[in-house]
Amino acid sequence: MRGTMQSLSLGARRQIAEGEAGLRQQQNLYEAVRSDRNLYSKNLIAAQDEILDLKRKFKILVRAALP
């Protein structure tokens, strides 16, 4: 009986350790994805700002070229 309890306890500890390792891996992946998303979002905002600036400059050039 005692041997069975110890082996169950060891098995349970092993399962917990594996679960925690999996959780840490998932957390690391989540952080990597979140970091990438933030970088892409920042780049998108910068590109959108540049597009708006180029559109404004284009309108100014068109108005200047027309009589």
Image (cartoon, helix red, strand yellow):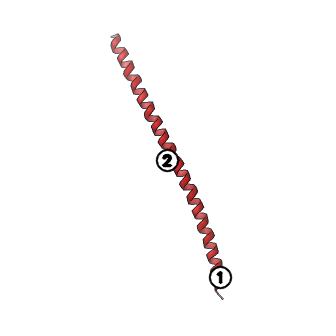
Residue to which mark 2 is pinned:
33
Name the quadrant containing residue 49: bottom right
Badge 2 density bin: few <14, some 14–19, many ≥20, Cα 10 Å:
few
Relative to 5, say whether 23 is above or below: below
Q: Name the residue at 63% across, 69% down.
A: 53
Mark with earlier residue (2, 1) = 2
**Quadrant (top left, top right, bottom left, bottom right) of the N terminus:** top left
Residue in view at x 37 percent, y 22 percent: 11
The picture places residue 34, in percent across and down from the top left corner, at 52, 47
Residue 54, how many percent across, how many down?
Answer: 61, 71
Residue at left offset 34%, top offset 12%:
3
What is the number of the mark on residue 63?
1
Mark 2 belongs to which amino acid? Answer: Val
Q: State the SS at label 2.
A: helix
| Rendered location of residue 2, percent (x, y) | 35, 10
Q: Is residue 6 above or below residue 22?
A: above
Give the quadrant of the C terminus.
Answer: bottom right
| Tag 2 near tag 1, CB within 8 Å | no
Q: Secondary structure at mark 1?
A: helix
Q: How many marks?
A: 2
Q: Residue 8: which quarter of the image?
A: top left
Q: Is residue 63 left or right of residue 8?
A: right
Give x and y (percent) for residue 26: 46, 39
